Image (spheres, helix red, strand yellow):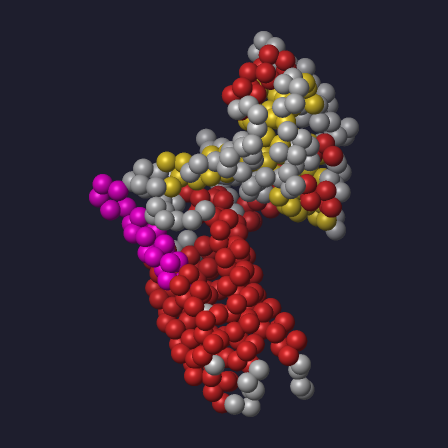
Amino acid sequence: MKINNTFKLIIAIVVSELAGIIGSIFTTPSIPIWYAGIAKPALNPPAWVFGPVWTTLFALMGIAAFLIWKKGLDRRDVKIALGIFIGQLVLNALWSIVFFGLHNPCWAFVEIIFLWLAILATIIVFAKISKPVVWLLVPYILWVSFAGYLNYSIWQLSTNKPGQIACTEEAKLCPDGSAVGRIGPNCEFALCPRINSLFSETEARVIAEKSCIKGGETLVGGVYNENSKTWWYDANLNSTREGCNPACVVSEETKTAEINWRCTGLIVPKGSVEAIQKLFTEKYPKYAKTITVSVNQETQDYARGSVTFEAGAPGGIFLAAKIDGKWQIVFDGNGAISCNLSKYGFPNEMLVDCAE
């Protein structure tokens, strides 16, 4: 069957991006926990950089493969070239499995050497068919070379040589709801994203304490909502309302604070905590014995609460929903809560601190 060039281009790009999608299955769960806590070299870029870079590189790979494919699969050199190309895609996905899935920088470095050689072989065989196509793969091999340096550096930093500091796998919750890990030679926390607020978290807390709490009551956290220009603090109050999770909300515009009870109007059904905790242990088996889950707000089909992966470590907010009658985690505490989660039907009270 003859395939026109438009479909060939789409197929080539989709196949290339598929390698990235497979790798992301192992990468995404590891970034906020394992990767955030390991020691990294000074040139290590922020975690958010990798997604856009790899998406672009896979697209360029797909275009390059398409241009070679256009030369005709009846040619033996084209078949060999595309075979080598597919081989390096497999090695690319395998590296993510070894590094992020198995948490093994040593074997990942060995694997990335073979990946680099496979990319070089792809460039050589592509060049014999079309030299201009090679330029589409130059950014790829340069980035993998840089990734090899990062991989090697992380491996060396994790070998616990005499006098070397090993960073603990913990994260610090930032005011915008995201989390950062320890980096650098002294395992100091990375800087939190900058908050565009008229006053600091400390200033907002002073306003909250004056307006929202009385003797014996406390405030927890301090998360900034960019959309509503408000600071949110979980409030441990002497008075309670069934089915409510009170928060003290500080307005940036008025510089005043008030209690938002965040009531669902329903009593938390029994058994949901156990079901949601089981989902977390299945998703993060490494922390199966230390994960703690608590549900603060819940309706029949939706739940919001906090999850802590290790005792004494900062926790994060999670959102879960019943889909086809079974609980599923739709937000596991990595980053800020997206307002797009409203598509699942979450009550507004559970998304008051979401970000666009």
- Of 175 and 253, which appears nearest the observer? 253
Q: How many marks?
A: 0
Q: Quadrant of residue 2?
A: bottom right
Q: Quadrant of residue 123?
A: bottom left
Residue found at the far right of this picture: 265
| Quadrant for the N terminus in the image | bottom right
- Of 321 and 22, which appears nearest the observer? 22
From this viewpoint, is residue 233 visible? yes
Residue 314 position within the rendered picture, expressed as x and y whole percent measured from the top left: 49, 33
Residue depicted at x 36% and y 54%: 150
Residue found at the far front of this picture: 132
41 above or below 212?
below
Magenta span contains residue 154: yes
Residue 82 position within the rendered picture, expressed as x and y whole percent measured from the top left: 50, 79
Residue depicted at x 55% and y 81%: 69
112 above or below 232?
below
| Quadrant for the C terminus in the image | top right
Residue depicted at x 36% and y 49%: 43
From this viewpoint, is residue 278 visible? no
Relative to 248, is 265 on the left or the right?
right
Q: Quadrant of residue 305?
A: top right
Residue 203 position within the rendered picture, expressed as x and y whole percent measured from the top left: 54, 19
Residue found at the far left of this picture: 162
Relative to 92, is 242 on the left or the right?
right
Residue depicted at x 55% and y 23%: 199
Q: Main secondary structure of the magenta part?
A: helix
Magenta span contains residue 239: no
- Of 30 and 258, which appears nearest the observer? 258
- The stretch in magenta equals 144-164
- Of 6 and 156, which appears nearest the observer? 6
Residue 55 position within the rendered picture, expressed as x and y whole percent measured from the top left: 54, 60
